[in-house]
Image (spheres, rainbow, N blue to C red):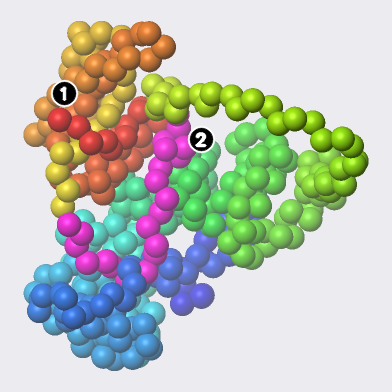
Amino acid sequence: MPNGYNGVRVQGQLQNLRNMNCVFRAILIGLCLLVARLPAAEASYETGLAAFERGDYAQALRDWLVEAEKGDARAQHNVAVIYDSGRGVTADPAEALRWYERAAAQGLPEAQNNLGMLYSRGRGTEADLSHAIELWTTAARSGYALAEFNLGLAYANAQGVPKDLTRARRLFEAAAAKKLPDAQFALGQVYHIGFGVDPDPREARRWFELAAARDYPGATEMLAKIDEEHPATKPSPEPQPQPAKQEEAEPLPEPQPQPAEQEEAEPSPTLAAATAPEAEKQGLAPPSDVQQTGLRLWLGSLTSAEKVEQQWRQMQESFGDLFQAMDLRVAEVERDQRKFYRLLAGPVPDRDRGREICRALQERDPEAWCKVVDGP
């Protein structure tokens, strides 16, 4: 629905943010998998994926409706997509809204994001920007890139929230770190025009190059504009190798001992965007993965076990909702003849859940360190 999901412009300056097509791009989560080994309850969902892949949207809808009525959030979301996009059926935003709401109530961030789009545009319901902001905020806390981007635009434009350029930029950075080209292009514009920051053509070029690598419309033109306005930032051509002179061969040097493999350094605080994992492929909702065990959250390293325990108490006081039912483990490590003590919280049921918690923590505290690791 190219005319229904345009990006919000930043006071006329972020001109080429293009149609986000949030439903087309967030809509269909996951790719077709083989059905033969799947249990019967999953097969109907997977056969719907296969039907959608081959363009048989009516059959996909029939298959997904079976699972959607049973309460499968992924199937509910994809049924909503069918009605939202009008693929194989007459577009029905009100019916899409009904199914998005059911999936969003189960915590599916893709559905929360798309439901927010309907409320922001008044499609299938009365426009309610405040509710859209709530939905995008919830999905963004799960680390969903499109919701981070939409919420960033809201803060940049003061649409339903007070204007906050710093928060907008951080949300763009979080989404761009997951390789969302919309956010990469937006950051290029931010640094090109100096929107809430000092203009920085080199940083603008970096983000436009990333967006251009994903064939984002307008990115190549912006690179050409930067070349014209700031030729010094244009990368120098790669030097061509020169043919070696024919000289008497020298004896080969004695083999040198190889340095020991570098162990992982103790962390220094970084922005959440720098530690966000690559975004999952956006498409149809994937089947449930196998749960892993023995995983914990590495929340930093300190110079004594007592400081670790003190830090853990502080984190529980500030972010207790994120660490419910978790306990503390202290792991002693040695770096450069110095001892460090790692704060390990957990366990977490699987890596995806651990990453969700890390993303939520780093959105609240951008300098927080959080990483999913194997632990005791």
Q: Is residue 65 left or right of residue 219?
A: left
For residue 144, above or below residue 360: below
For residue 373, above or below residue 32: above
Q: Is residue 250 left or right of residue 217?
A: right
Which stretch did the figure color magenta?
269-290
Q: Which mark is residue 169?
A: none
* Residue 96 drawn at (x, y percent): 28, 76
Q: Residue at x 41, y 12 (%)?
A: 336
Q: Residue at x 14, y 44 (%)?
A: 293
Callouts 1 and 2 close, C-beta under 8 Å: no
Query: Looking at this view, is 350 or 337 the one in front?
Result: 337
For residue 225, above or below residue 336: below
* Residue 283 drawn at (x, y percent): 37, 69
Report helix, strand or loop for mark 1.
strand
Q: Residue at x 90, y 41 (%)?
A: 246
What is the chief secondary structure element of the magenta stretch?
loop
Q: Of the residues shown, which amino acid type is indicated by label 1?
A: Arg
Q: Mark 1 and mark 2: span between their CA atoms?
A: 35 Å
Q: Is residue 12 left or right of residue 62?
A: right
Q: Is residue 333 left or right of residue 262?
A: left
Residue that numbered label 1 is attached to: 329
Count residues near mark 2 (Cα–Cα under 10 Å), then give few for <14, some for 14-19, many for 20+: some
Query: Looking at this view, is 18 or 288 the one in front?
Result: 288
Q: Of the residues shown, which amino acid type is indicated by label 2?
A: Thr
Q: Is residue 61 magenta?
A: no
Quadrant containing the C terminus is top left
Query: Looking at this view, is 69 or 136 the one in front?
Result: 69
Report helix, strand or loop for mark 2.
helix
Query: Looking at this view, is 6 or 264 the one in front?
Result: 264
